[in-house]
Image (tube, rainbow, N blue to C red):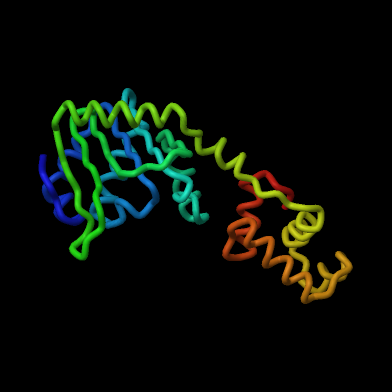
Amino acid sequence: MVSIQGDAELIARAGHLIESARTEFVCAARDMRTWSQPEAMCAIRNRVRAAASTGFTCRKLLSPVALADEQARAHLRQVQRNGTGVRISGSPLPHETIVIDQRVMILAGRETPGGREYTVTTSQVLVDGVHSLFRAVWDSAVELDAYLRDDVPHLDADSRLILQALGSGATDESAARRLGVSLRTYRRRVAELMTKLEADSRFQAGMRAAELGLPA
C-alpha cells in the first residue's frame, strides 16, 4: 500500500497501472472534479476510450451531483456513446475509487493544500472487498439515460408556451404579446424557466429541453 500526494505524483508513480488495464476499468466518484488535473484525466480517458475494445469493460458510477451542469451531462453522454457504462447512484459515495482489472485499487482521500491524497494498493483482500461493494452499488444504480428521463422538471402550460416561443426565435416583445403578458413578466418567466431547466443561457435551455424530450 502506497500513499501519494497530488495528481502529478499519482501519475508519476501509478500512471503505468492505469494504462495497464486490460480487462476491466471501474471508477466511482461523487462528482466530475475528483480526477481533475490534466495528467490524471488524460490517463483515465485513455482507459475509457479502450471500452470500445473487444473484451474490455469500463464502468463509471457517479452521484447525482455529477450532473449539476450541462457540460458534465454532455461529457457523460459522450463517454457513454464511446462504450462506457455510466450509472447514477442514489446512495452516497463516500470515497472516489478506481479499480483496475480487479487487482489494483486507487482510493482518493481528502483535499490538502498540496493536493488530494491517494492510496494505491494491490492487496487482493482490499481490492476484492471494494470491488464487491462497487458491484452491489452498481447493480442498484440507474442507467444515465433512464436517470435523465426521470429527472424531467414539471413545466406548467405557461412554461411550455414560453419554451415554444424561445424555440421559434421570436423576439421577447412579440412573444410577450403572443402570450398576453408584459415584457417584464415574460422575461421574468424566461429566467424562472432557465432556472428550472438548470440552464445558464436560452440556448442551453433549448438543449436541455431537447434532452428531456420537452417541446422546443
User: Relative to 70, does residue 64 appear above or below in the rendering?
Assistant: above
Residue drawn at (73%, 52%) of the image: 155
Horizontal arrangement in the rendering, residue 131 relative to residue 143 (left or right): left
Q: Quadrant of residue 114?
A: bottom left
Which percent across, then down, holds residue 72? Answer: 46, 52
Looking at the image, the residue that sits furthest to the top is 55
Which percent across, then down, holds residue 50? Answer: 31, 35
Horizontal arrangement in the rendering, residue 164 relative to residue 152 (left or right): right
Q: Quadrant of residue 151?
A: top right
- Quadrant showing the N terminus: top left
**In front of the other: 168 or 131:** 131
Which percent across, then down, holds residue 6? Answer: 19, 56
Horizontal arrangement in the rendering, residue 207 relative to residue 136 (left or right): right
Horizontal arrangement in the rendering, residue 160 relative to residue 92 (left or right): right
Q: Quadrant of residue 84?
A: top left
Number of numbered labels in the structure image: 0
Which percent across, then down, holds residue 49? Answer: 34, 39
Residue drawn at (78%, 66%) of the image: 170
Residue drawn at (15%, 37%) of the image: 121
User: Relative to 87, does residue 30 appear above or below in the rendering?
Assistant: below
**In front of the other: 214 or 169:** 214
**In front of the other: 180 or 48:** 180
